[in-house]
Image (cartoon, helix red, strand yellow):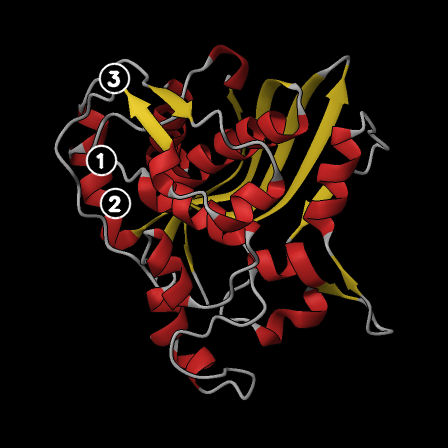
Amino acid sequence: MKQYLDLCQRIVDQGKWVVNDRTGERCLTVINADFTYDVDEGKYPLVTTRKSPIKLAIAELLGYIRGYSNAADFRKLGTRSWDANANENVAWLKNPHRKGTDDCGRIYGVQARSWQTPDGISIDQLEKVVNNLKNGIDDRGEIITFYNPGEFHMGCLRPCMHSHQFSLLDGELFLNSTSRSVDVPLGLVANMQQVYVFLAIMAQITGHKPGKGFHKLVNCHIYENQFDLMKDVQLKREPLEQPKLIINPDIKTLKDLETWVTVDDFVVEGYEYYDPIEYPFSV
């Protein structure tokens, strides 16, 4: 919570106003921040200065792991986070690659599970990393990237948190994740949880002890229509104790994650929080 609130205060105090071309809205922006998540100590990075979504963040990650490209599939898992980008993004609605209602195109998990090479070969990045880690292999390239410039035009949104590199060191698993663009009041609240859960669940299914998750944030911003709520409400609140995340120990394989696992297999204990803050979402 301290690193999150410190970043929010830094943006309020030092940020510069810029206009975002995609949304047409002004954002108060700073460049570069580095977060660390103590997965090894079980400190779940859930924001306590407002009630924050839990199932939404985990459902979205499960959708990426399964390679989903349709907002309806994400909804079935428990999140509506892709509804607006799939169905209200004006540029995407006009895109000839859009297949119809709820289609998101070749986004996040599609790239992770079926990256297309120029000669037509499909690469499952996630499966390769899981298999290597299960066999105790770290070739210094255990990387899963959603960022495919050759197919940006085939999806409704470029990936924001776009790459994840796993490192195995003496039986302990670490994760370095990178976000190019961070909506701090909304997106970051989910991304913090996702880095933690991704490392915890990958350690569980590959048989390693989880270490720390490291999260590089590049363009960190608060939209103009979020600013007053952040400055006058959320930053006035004192953080509460961090909760714990309990993951179903029966989850043992990638196939489990692909088939029967739901958000109910992830339980947060001891979560205390302030009232919700309804931050506007920009499409």
For numbered disc 3, what is the local secondary structure? loop
Judge whether 97 appears above or below 183 on screen: below
At x 22% / y 35%, what residue is drawn?
231
Q: CA distance from mark 1 to mark 3?
A: 27 Å
Note whether residue 114 is visible: yes
* Percent coordinates x, y for residue 131 in the rendering: 76, 38
Name the foreground residue: 172 vs 21.
172
Image quarter for residue 205? top right
Q: Mark 2 belongs to which amino acid?
A: Phe
Name the foreground residue: 53 vs 59.
59
Q: Mark 1 belongs to which amino acid?
A: Lys
Image quarter for residue 169? top right
Q: Check the picture and name the quadrant holding the N terminus.
A: top left
* Percent coordinates x, y for residue 278 in the rendering: 18, 47
At x 61% / y 37%, what residue is drawn?
253
At x 34% / y 58%, what residue is drawn?
76
Give the side of residue 69 with respect to residue 45, left or right: right
For numbered disc 1, what is the local secondary structure? helix
Judge whether 7 appears above or below 43 on screen: below
Q: Which mark is residue 227?
A: 2
Q: Which residue is mark 1?
A: 231
Q: Which residue is mark 3?
A: 270
Q: Are marks 2 and 1 in contact (CB under 8 Å)?
A: yes
Image quarter for residue 88? bottom left
Q: Mark 3 belongs to which amino acid?
A: Gly
Give the side of residue 273 with respect to residue 189, left or right: left
For numbered disc 2, what is the local secondary structure? helix
